[in-house]
Amino acid sequence: MSRSGADVRFGVTGHRTLPPVVAGHAADHWRRVLPAGAGLHGVSSLADGADQLFAACVLAAGGTLEVVLPCAGYAGSLEDGSRARFHDLLRASATVLTMPYPEPSEQAFLAAGKALVDRCDHLFAVWDGLPARGLGGTADVVAYARARGRPVTVLWIDGVIRD
């Protein structure tokens, strides 16, 4: 899936809970490097934290958003505070793909992570570099992207510890 210039499709994976300094660092990075306008295409699962932050940055830059949901009823697995943002971002997305799982599970999260990587040319990972806390976590998605030869940009600040 090789494209050039503004036709690059960017995906995101990352932690659902981000220290504010890391969230600011990631958002600043995206504002600097993402192309503005219709040539920008982002892929996200819209989870709390990094996924929603990235999706908002893509839309703010005038890009289009593709959403890969792990399962039907995914919104119910999100924190109360992020459900409204999830629905707003979902309504603003150009396309939505839902994995064939009836409810949230580690297998559904891994399938969505792989599908997301398969739909992007470059993956941003808002990741502390530690192993996944469950199957389908950020580390698993990064490992899959690297195995598929996708460039991965890790956005984290050395010395910052997640929760």
Image: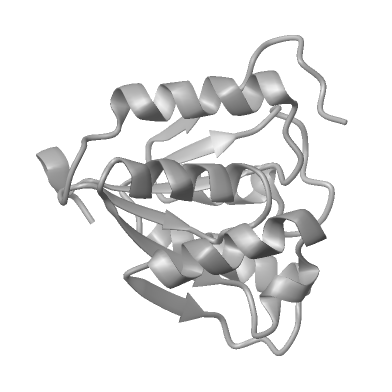
- Is residue 65 in view from this perspective? yes
In depth, the one of 17 and 123 nearer the eye is: 17
Image side of residue 76 versus residue 113, left or right = right
Rendered position, 70 above or below 17: below
Q: Nearer the viewer, residue 41 or 38?
A: 38
Question: Where does residue 118 sit, x and y in percent of width and height?
Answer: 39, 61
User: Quick one: 13 or 144, which is closer to the camera?
Assistant: 13
In the image, 22: left or right of 120? right
Q: Residue at x 42, y 51 (%)?
A: 148
Q: Quadrant of residue 57?
A: top left
Q: Is residue 38 left or right of residue 135?
A: left
Residue 79 higher or lower than 63, as above or below: below
Relative to residue 52, is residue 107 drawn left or right? right
Residue 84 position within the rendered picture, expressed as x and y whole percent measured from the top left: 65, 63
| Residue sitting at x 60%, y 58% | 85
Please state, as top left, top right, bottom left or bottom right, where the N terminus lies in the image: bottom left
The percent coordinates of residue 98 (x first, y second) are: 52, 81
Find residue 147 and report its horizontal and vertical position in percent: 48, 47
Quadrant that contains the C terminus: top right
Whether residue 155 appears in this view of the structure is no
